[in-house]
Image: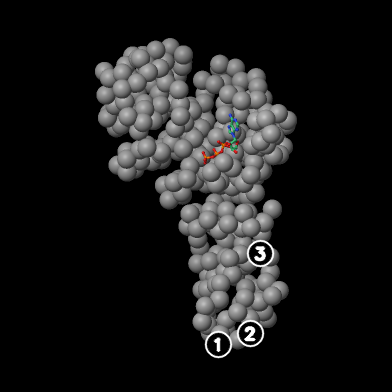
Amino acid sequence: MTTASVVQADDVWKSFGRIDALQGLSLAVPEGSAYAFIGANGAGKTTTIKLLMNMLAPSRGTASVMGVDTRRLSPEVLAQIGYVSENQALPRRLGVGDYLEYLRPFYPGWDRALETSICKRLQLPLKRRIGELSHGMRIKVALACALPYRPKLLILDEPFSGLDPLVREEFMEGLLLEAGDVTMLISSHELGEIESLSTHVGFIDAGRMLIEESMSDLGARLREVRITLEHPAAVPANLPKEWLQPRAFGNVFSFVDTRYSENDLGERIRALLGPVRHIDAEPMPLRTVFTTLARAARDGAIQ
Ligand code: ATP
């Protein structure tokens, strides 16, 4: 049985004048997942997220959130989405506490006890005006406004930018507490931070989804392979295309295998490179997965 997608985009294009920010992007965020939406600067993450929140309309293609076309998101649907972005517009003249008070009536499920505990956890100065706060404090305010109504979907665009390490950690702990009940779409360059939380990953490049997979599948098929040969190593001319970043140094040959299979790796290596002394195939942290894929995408090694 396939899990329903809470967020779905099919062949979506978005142009800004002559710039095609999205070029046939497809995306599916399964219900209950924590989806890490990653990609290089300018890849189209924020554009996608704005489109999902109906802050932008697609030039072509469709996207839906909780089964509703993003161009027709009703206040009822929006009331089930928590949205936090690093550049979120907040009313600068209002005090933090006043803004929370203003928001409460819009959300039938607003939980006052949760609001209080979040404000305490984030140490929000309820009496201060939002406009006077630092960038990081404003992100904390946006977060405190998005969680108390227990949204079914949390969309976070660069939520960590400007947050100090302690707040990041506490924020992550808070998110983990929420996890399970909520579907999350998180765009971030802080890959170390989101790795432990994520169940799925979508890697976007130049406005297209290059890889969308569960973390467990991705983790199983990507390996950093390091081979010690019986003789000096050289990069073979007929290198399989799924072996990325080949490097030869002394007797060592290393590469990233994007189709790792324990069963036939040794055999393939011996056939291509000759006698082998030792083979190491290590799982890769998300950060290395990202740099490998980003480099390969840039060099046209994956399309
Ligand atoms: P980053 O990681 O740097 O935040 P991103 O993946 O979020 O990048 P986007 O902000 O979605 O990338 O931008 C994608 C492309 O669309 C970029 O080339 C950007 O310059 C362009 N773009 C985005 N918004 C506009 C706009 N309002 N007008 C013109 N071009 C835009």
Quick check: marks 3 and 1 in contact, CB under 8 Å?
A: no
Secondary element under disc 1, as helix, strand or loop, is loop
Question: Which numbered circle lies on residue 230?
Answer: 1
Q: Is residue 31 left or right of residue 303?
A: left
Secondary element under disc 3, as helix, strand or loop, is loop
Question: How many residues crowd mark 1 within 10 Å: few (<14), some (14–19), many (20+)?
Answer: some
- Pointer 2 residue: 274
Quick check: marks 2 and 3 in contact, CB under 8 Å?
A: no
Residue 246 in the image: above or below residue 116:
below
- Pointer 3 residue: 242
Label 3 is placed on what type of residue? Glu
Q: Nearer the viewer, residue 96 or 21?
A: 21
Question: Which numbered circle lies on residue 42?
Answer: none
Give percent across and percent down for residue 211.
Answer: 63, 50
Residue 52 in the image: above or below residue 278:
above
Q: In which quadrant of the rendered view does residue 273 lie?
A: bottom right
Secondary element under disc 2, as helix, strand or loop, is loop
Question: How many residues crowd mark 3 within 10 Å: few (<14), some (14–19), many (20+)?
Answer: some
The residue depicted at 65 percent of the width and 49 percent of the height is 210
Give percent across and percent down for residue 51.
Answer: 61, 29
Label 1 is placed on what type of residue? Glu
Give percent across and percent down for residue 84.
Answer: 46, 30
The residue depicted at 51 percent of the width and 63 percent of the height is 283
Quick check: marks 1 and 2 in contact, CB under 8 Å?
A: yes
Under 8 Å from ligand 1: the CB of mark 1? no
Q: Is residue 113 at least partly visible in the picture? A: no
How far apart are labels 1 and 2 at the CA level?
A: 8 Å
The residue depicted at 62 percent of the width and 76 percent of the height is 235
* Mark sitting earlier along the chain (1/2): 1
In the picture, the quarter occupied by the N terminus is top right
How far apart are labels 3 and 1 at the CA level?
A: 24 Å
